[in-house]
Amino acid sequence: MGKLKFPLKLKDNVDVHNIDELREHFDLERIIGYFQDGRLLTWLKGRYYDMRGIIRMCG
């Protein structure tokens, strides 16, 4: 079974498929929601990223 890939809906309801789009359409409130319900970690793992990428982006 392959990696599960799905877009995240962020600012202006844009579908985000990669880390560059995540930076461009960053929406802290929605990112926190995705973090809390586990979808952010699943999205990151599906793209071979980890939480360090998000921490670097925010810091």
Image (spheres, rainbow, N blue to C red):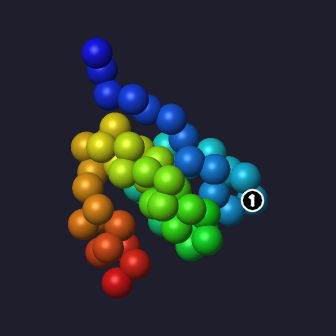
| Quarter of the image that includes the C terminus | bottom left
Q: Quick one: which residue is furthest to the front in this view?
A: 37
Q: Is residue 22 left or right of residue 3?
A: right
| Residue 52: image location, x then y, percent | 24, 66
Q: Quick one: which residue is furthest to the top in this view?
A: 1
| Quarter of the image that includes the N terminus | top left
Q: Is residue 24 visible?
A: no
Q: Residue at x 62, y 45 (%)?
A: 15
Q: Residue at x 46, y 60 (%)?
A: 35
- Amino acid of disc 1: Asp
Q: Is residue 45 visible?
A: yes
Q: Nearer the viewer, residue 32 or 16?
A: 32
Q: Residues within 10 Å of mark 1 (few under 14, many from 20)?
A: few
Image height of 15 relative to 31, above or below: above
Image height of 29 relative to 13, above or below: below
Image quadrant where residue 33 sits? bottom right
* Dot 1: element: helix
Question: What is the total number of numbered labels drawn onto the structure image?
Answer: 1
| Residue 27: image location, x then y, percent | 60, 68
Image height of 28 relative to 11, above or below: below
Q: Quick one: which residue is furthest to the right in this view?
A: 12
Image quadrant where residue 45 sits? top left
Image height of 35 relative to 42, above or below: below
Q: Which residue is mark 1?
A: 12
Q: Residue at x 49, y 43 (%)?
A: 17
| Residue 31: image location, x then y, percent | 53, 64
